[in-house]
Amino acid sequence: MAKKPKKPLEVEALKHEAATRKNIPTAEFESVMRAEDKTPIQLAYERRNPDLDPQLVWRGKDVVDWSDLIVHAPPLYIQEKVHPKVIIDDLKRVSKARAAEAHPAMPDLFADFNGLDLEAKTEFYAHDQHWSNRMISGDSLSVMASLAEREGLRGQVQCIYFDPPYGIKFNSNFQWSTTSRDVKDGAKDHITREPEQVRAFRDTWRDGIHSYLTYLRDRLTVARDLLHESGSIFVQIGDENVHRVRALMDEVFGEENAISTLVVQKTYGFSANAVSNVADYIVWFCKNKERLKVRPIYREKPFELGSGNATWLLLNDFSYRSVSVKEKDEGQAIPSGARPYNPDNLISQGRASEPQPYSYRGIIQDPWPKNSHWKPNYSAGIQRLARSERLHLASNSFRYRRFHSDSGVLPISNIWTDTGTGNFTDDKIYVVQTGSKTVERCILMTTDPGDLVLDPTCGSGTTAYVAEQWGRRWITIDTSRVAIALARSRLMGARYPYYLLADSPEGQHKEGEVTRQVPKTTPTRGDIRHGFVYERVPHITLKSIANNAEIDVIWDQKQPAVDAARAALNAALKGHGTPFKVETGGRAGKTIDFRQMGEVSLPSGEAAPAAGFMEWEIPRAAPDQWPAPAKKALAQFWDARIARQREIDASIAAKAEFEYLYDKPYVDNGRVRVAGPFTVESLSPHRTLAVDWDDELIDTLAAAEGRYGAPGKDDIVTDFAHMILENLKTAGVQQAHKEDRITFTSLTGWPGNFICAEGVFMEGDKQRRAGVFIGPEFGTVSRPDLVAAAREAGDAGFDVLIACAFNYDAHSAEFDKLGRVPVLKARMNPDLHMGGDLKSTATGNLFVIFGEPDIKIEDAGDGMIRVRVYGVDVFKPQTGEVVSEGTDGIALWMLDTDYNEESFFVRHAYFLGANDPYKALKTTLKAEIDEEAWESLHSDTSRPFPKPKSGRIAVKVINHLGDEVMKVFSA
């Protein structure tokens, strides 16, 4: 018979249709924002009264406690809009086209990404739009303040998972590249080059543990403001600082809102002088303990043979025996299918109004003479126990079989020894990556599907990855562009099981099947807030069985088949010459002679056939000498009896009270899920506020322009702009090759708004004047900054603008000229941040011309085009040549094949780095997407696509250091 063709896997993504978020500007719309929307909002957070409770004291705390915590909340800008399903749909399309298969038209999932009309698109913070998850680059303190104040998320976050650096060492906490997790303290080539990270080390960590505690308290204070009244926060920390963190959280959240300190076993331990440290700690607090949302997570209840609910065994043939000495003490395995139980009391004190005799298996018992009564209702309740194989025959009484599996789970404790294995199996892509099993458990305990989860320390994106898997909304934040690059790739290629939604026809059907009830037929909308359909563990009690009337119905349906098989067996054995010894019941120890006639009387007064079996007397296996018809009838009997018992057990489980297993939803194996839509965002790209060495707020743009007064001569730090100019004068501006250095013959101050110095250099035998623009010490230079500086340079008659910055935004990449004025973008070496010890790691090139991607658009025929990335263009100022440096340094490049100049939609993505984020999806969808399509994800040449309706395409390239550049082309 021909094999039925396998149904193709459907690829789905969850939507949070009932949730919304504020309409915020994209980077493209920055220039049309109102001035008041651009200006950072100043927030004041009241510090807890130190007189109210014990507190931790550290250097400088008493000074900052004199005033409120002041946080500046700048606007956030959307850099990219990502919908991973778009990429998978495109791969499916090209695979089917190659196989000459018809394929349905793919809907444009970006068409209604926001759900806003045209007029509302540029009215920022005034309208609600469709929810999309969020990956935000920036300092978590400012980002969280912006979310609370500008976007109305105050009191909306259900769970915060905060994984700060465990200690105060620099390199051990920050990864320098997407290509390597090997980070060594003091290694020259492993120093992170990101100014945000350097600032975190230099300005926040500079005073050791004292600065560390200030850093933590400030962020915990703002995080508390975001938490819902029923919300929880988890802070993961090592043993070095767990005691300090606990005291700090007592102060911020109140000791009355402490829930627990979780002890999490690691996959490995660090050796110490005395013992190895094999655990990390998670300090769990809530916003308001009276309103705490908690969903218990269960583990299998252990049992010890010979004690508790495991003193006896019910075997497959419904016979029973006590646990043997070898099983109890010597580790001998119990028989397959045996169910451990304990015979429990079935009677209670107090005589009933009348006798309550009950006959079971030929034995009768009545608690009335003992001044007692049956616990279950008489006689229907105790009869249901008997029909369910729940009565245990003791020497002179009936007892209730309480199986170990009747309540086979226990709530987890605060000691987690099973998370190490789960962490070890995660693909490790980040130096301080948290295991998904740990984060998963915290999220599942304190949230429901559709709730919002926040992670102020994104890292490799584990919290976002786990939240996406379990249908939670998420926001994740990190200062590190390397971390954001890794997390973006991880989410784009993530594969998840498709859990059955409770609010779906399939979910309703499964719920009816599990509960043995008629499925609901109410209309469904696929609302994730209704949750999933979960597996559950019954909590079976004597009362639930005794009151389960469905047992009687099942008995009436199934018993005729059992009785017919027993009658056939007795008929087949009539006249058989070998007697059978009975093991249990009223005839226990006696024999059945199949040649006798008539009936015998059992101790209960019941009559039994002298030459035949009662139901409970029939053996599981036939003696060898039994005739074939008897063996056949015996098999039919056990089939009927087991079927009856299976139905009764299922009814008992379905009708009992139960515990939901929130970590075990039912899976639809015909579908696979990818991450839902998310945005990549950043803080305002310019005019950021920072602190000086005295923790005074300073305007870093003013500092960059030389308008921030130099500190006193005794201060260890010189004025930033002055220091940069001194180094620029000495080092010049270097390109990839030594012969391409711009060497200044003079460099003098210039009193401009953006231009702060005039540099003179030789181009061949001609003298050129360069206007020098210095970007902010801890920020990013954006295209508007460059435009303003270039305009000023042109007005002043300079031949060229040399911009010096630690980082440029993606949109500045294509800006290389304004009129006659070329714009050279030099990246400053982050060693210029550091001073002191870290400065000794300098490689010599302090100012390097910023490269651009070398990109070509090619005709692919049939009205299609393709894009090819050749590498990064590097400009040689001495010769005027542009040279491509190849694709080795590119981690990811993305393509918006129909760029509308309003948003960058990631319609294609190509991963040239070492990691393959699509490894799991490739295995799952190998029948739906061919190998050639998968391989295209790692190509420097895009898949062909139609010419854009907008007439423009945009290409964004990200290198392994997290730097981004973007170019727009007409096509």
Image (cartoon, rainbow, N blue to C red):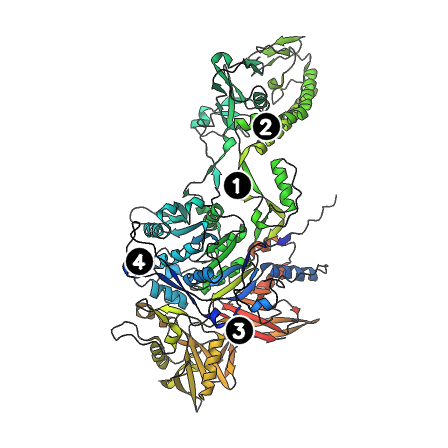
Q: Earlier in the sequence, mark 4 or mark 1?
A: 4
Q: Indicate left or right for 540 with 96 as reference.
A: left
Residue hosting label 2: 548
**Label disc, if present, on residue 32 of the rendered structure:** 3
Q: Earlier in the sequence, mark 3 or mark 2?
A: 3
Q: Earlier in the sequence, mark 4 or mark 2?
A: 4
**Label disc, if present, on residue 684 of the rendered structure:** none
Tell me the amino acid under the disc marked 3: Val
Q: CA distance from mark 4 to mark 2?
A: 63 Å
Q: Secondary structure at mark 1?
A: strand
Tell me the amino acid under the disc marked 1: Leu
Q: Indicate left or right for 631 with 490 as reference.
A: right
Residue found at the very far left of the displayed protein: 714
Q: CA distance from mark 1 to mark 3?
A: 50 Å
**Residue drawn at (56%, 69%) of the image:** 122
**Label disc, if present, on residue 209 of the rendered structure:** 4
Residue found at the very far bottom of the displayed protein: 765
Q: Earlier in the sequence, mark 3 or mark 4?
A: 3
Q: CA distance from mark 4 to mark 1?
A: 41 Å
Q: Secondary structure at mark 2?
A: loop
Q: Which callout, 1 or 3, points to the residue nearer the camera?
A: 3
Residue hosting label 1: 661
Image quadrant where one finds the N terminus: top right
Q: Residues within 10 Å of mark 4 (few under 14, many from 20)?
A: some
Image quadrant where one finds the C terminus: bottom right
